[in-house]
Amino acid sequence: MLDEFSAIARELGQFDAEDSLVRMLASLVSASHEFIGIADLEGNALFVNEAGRKLVGLPDLEAVRSTRIIDYFSADDHRRILDEVLPAVRDTGFWEGELKFRNFQTGQLIPVLYNIFPVRDSTSAIAAYGTVTRNLTESKSADQRLRSLASIVESSDDAIVSKNLDGIIANWNRGAERIFGYTSDEAIGQPITIVIPTDRQSKSGKF
């Protein structure tokens, strides 16, 4: 990793090969689980860290340097990259949004939160583009599980109700509408005691 970073640093004119900052940056990048990459101004990839190479199925730095920025994205995103992303970073210095990477070996599409920003040399001129991209696969899967659970709860014939710590109704499904006679708009925000018989309300704190 140090050799790779030293080579990139020399190309960008930023640091001497033995500069201690290079060593610190190399350690940081090596430990990161995010995709970290650098490309030249023509869009040719110069560097991708180990976690990034694993994500997209590239075995080593030599393989990285045979690729271009556009190669990392699904075909459906290519037009957006060319028409929106690259012009934005040239004009404003930053772009961020959700796109899909592709794995070079399997073709699998990977949802990511991608950003791109300029990397400047020692004279403050833009020498390359950088990215620190997050893999969204796990969060997307979690969102899907939550949506599936919400769908099950909403469609259940049983009354499913939740309240907050103050005893105020927070969720109210269709089963609760049918059984208790209140719509969700009517029930949410009301105290849970509206569905508890008067003679049992002293125990409602345990509901």
Image (cartoon, rainbow, N blue to C red):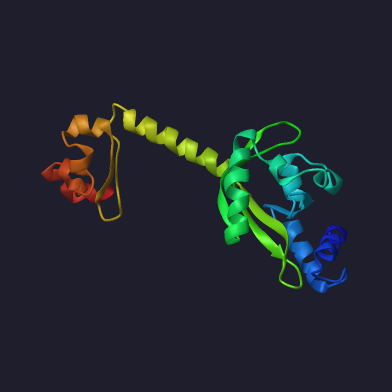
Whether residue 201 is situated above or below residue 158 in the rendered picture: below
Q: Position of residue 4 (x, y in %)?
A: 85, 57
Q: Position of residue 128 (x, y in %)?
A: 73, 59
From the viewer's side, name the closer residue of 133 and 27: 133
Identified at 44% across, 32% down, the residue is 148
The part of the image, by quadrant, that contains residue 147 is top left
Is residue 128 in sight in this rendering? yes
Whether residue 179 is situated above or below residue 21 in the rendered picture: above
From the viewer's side, name the closer residue of 24 and 172: 24
The part of the image, by quadrant, that contains residue 165 is bottom left
Image check: 138 left or right of 108? left
Is residue 136 in sight in this rendering? no
Identified at 82% across, 60% down, the residue is 8
Whether residue 153 is situated above or below residue 84 in the rendered picture: above
Figure quadrant of the C terminus: top left
Identified at 19% across, 48% down, the residue is 190
Figure quadrant of the N terminus: bottom right
Q: As drawn, which residue projects farthest toward the top?
A: 157
Identified at 60% across, 39% down, the residue is 79
The tally of labels here is 0
Image check: 67 left or right of 113? right
Q: Position of residue 150 (x, y in %)?
A: 38, 36
Q: Position of residue 116 (x, y in %)?
A: 64, 55
Image check: 17 left or right of 206? right
Image check: 157 left or right of 152? left
